[in-house]
Image (cartoon, rainbow, N blue to C red):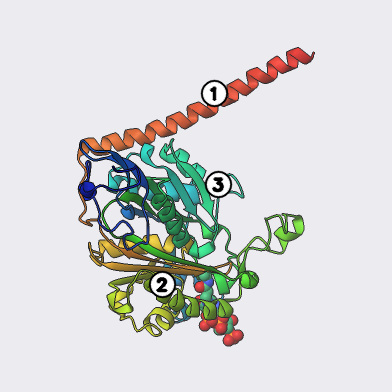
Amino acid sequence: MSTQNEQPEQANEPLNGAYNPEPNGRNGYHGHQELRQVKDGPAFIAPTPPRYAQIVGWGYHVPSKVITNRDLEQIVDTQDEWIRSRTGIEERHVAGSPQETSATLGIQAARKALDLADIHPNKIDLIICATSSPEHIFPATASLIQDGLGAKNAGAFDLSAACSGFVYGLSMARGHILAGDAEYVLVIGAETLSRIVDWTDRGTCVLFGDGAGAVLVAASDVPGGIMASVLGSDGSGADLLTVPAGGSAMPATLETVSNGSHYIKMDGRAVFRFATRVMAEATTKVLAKAGLTVQDVDLVIPHQANERIIQNSVLKQLQIPSEKVFVNLQKYGNTSTASIPIALCEAIEAGKVKPGDKLVFVGFGAGLTWGACAIEWRTPVEKQEATWWRNTQRQATYQAAAARSMWKRAIRRVYSQVLSTREDEATS
Ligand code: UT7
């Protein structure tokens, strides 16, 4: 007679849904165990089908204001030719109005990702906002995005790993999904670096730009998706790229403001050397983890910091041909955490991503940090035009979210006023 833990012969025939004979999958994921019942037979513990973390929606948003290299020639002692030849950057988008913030750019990008996946904000379980230019030390920019989306069932937190943040976020999203803790995770990279750049420092102000990119990661039983990730950090290089003041180590004072300690400070050459080394190393490691070789890779989407870093790392060291490496930094500069998701969206628009492709996202940044993800792309990339009715529904969803947020703030204000009046009356 079978006990609970023994699988009867018919065990490979599931009662409900498909049974994957490889419960460990290629992600090394072991799946959950659940109690099943074979027809007319005893109950037994059977593995559930393995879960995979698939990118099912993507979107980006950049501010409309553009600053070209020629514009920068009017601001600092620099030349278009120097910037192009040393970095590859031609122009960058910057937030021109106070209404454009890391959260508002992130909300725009996230809405596009949700619309594309046709997923209602209520379904999101977790929002991770990777950012190097958060709106505040706290609350998290992710919470502001959660409110703007009306994602009322989502947890939200900011992820601080500088320009590697988006790759870190994808790795966290994959972990939550494979653990069974979430069905939908929104990963956003959102930046308004123009607000923390010293516009008198030619060594940094020519490099950075503003923008946001978002992906929706969903649990799936389709094999593939985010297959592996590699994350790294070397805090001994913390001083090489930093905003020294404004945190608990150096709180804001008249002095920190007047000596520019709230702006980005960077040892460019040292960061360049570090980046060239870790980009190649992280790519090699993540491919090995995913059971792939360099030859299997269809497209690398590197952090868009400097064309020469990309050339000296993935192209030269790994011998990956340039047509398999996506570069769009000429248009946006270095948008930190947003650079990889913006580049992903543009690579898809350019027809460079299709189901079955093996992708690598690889980044580096302050910390020092680095990270890479290997992805087997499974989602169709053809754009489905939404009907007029669907668009109207979506608009209504976001308007309702804004109204709900305003209503909650108003109620909270009235409630606290009533309470404090009562307290005053009680103590008088
Ligand atoms: O997301 C991570 C963010 N950080 C990075 O990715 C930064 C990585 N590093 C870099 O991309 C490069 O190091 C830079 C683009 C920042 C600088 O390029 P470089 O080839 O390493 O130049 P350098 O710092 O060695 O400077 C060479 C010269 C210097 O002049 P001298 O001392 O040779 O007379 C600089 O003062 O270029 C000068 N210079 C400039 N000239 C015109 C530095 N910035 C500029 C500029 N315009 N904007």
- Front position in the image: 172 or 21: 21
Q: Quadrant of residue 415?
A: top right
Task: Sort mark 3 into few (<14), some (14-19) or many (20+) by Cα contacts within 10 Å.
Answer: many
Q: Are marks 1 and 3 in contact (CB under 8 Å)?
A: no
Looking at the image, residue 216 sits to the left or right of residue 204; the answer is left
Looking at the image, residue 411 sits to the left or right of residue 36; the answer is right
Which residue does the numbered mark 3 point to in the structure image?
A: 140
User: Helix, strand or loop at disc 1?
Assistant: helix
In this rendering, the answer to whether 228 lies above or below 310 is above
Which residue does the numbered mark 2 point to in the structure image?
A: 90
Q: Quadrant of residue 351?
A: bottom left
The residue lying at 34 percent from left, 49 percent from top is: 218
Q: CA distance from mark 2 to mark 3?
A: 32 Å
Residue 353 x/y as whole percent: 26, 65
In this rendering, the answer to whether 343 lies above or below 288 is above
Q: Amino acid at mark 2?
A: Glu
Disc 2, ligand 1: is the CB inside 8 Å? no
The residue lying at 44 percent from left, 68 percent from top is: 333
In this rendering, the answer to whether 279 lies above or below 160 is below
Choose mark 1 or mark 3, whichever is in front. 3
The quarter of the image that holds ligand 1 is bottom right
Residue 78 x/y as whole percent: 53, 77
Residue 260 x/y as whole percent: 68, 63
Which residue does the numbered mark 1 point to in the structure image?
A: 411
Q: CA distance from mark 1 to mark 3?
A: 22 Å
Q: Amino acid at mark 3?
A: Ala
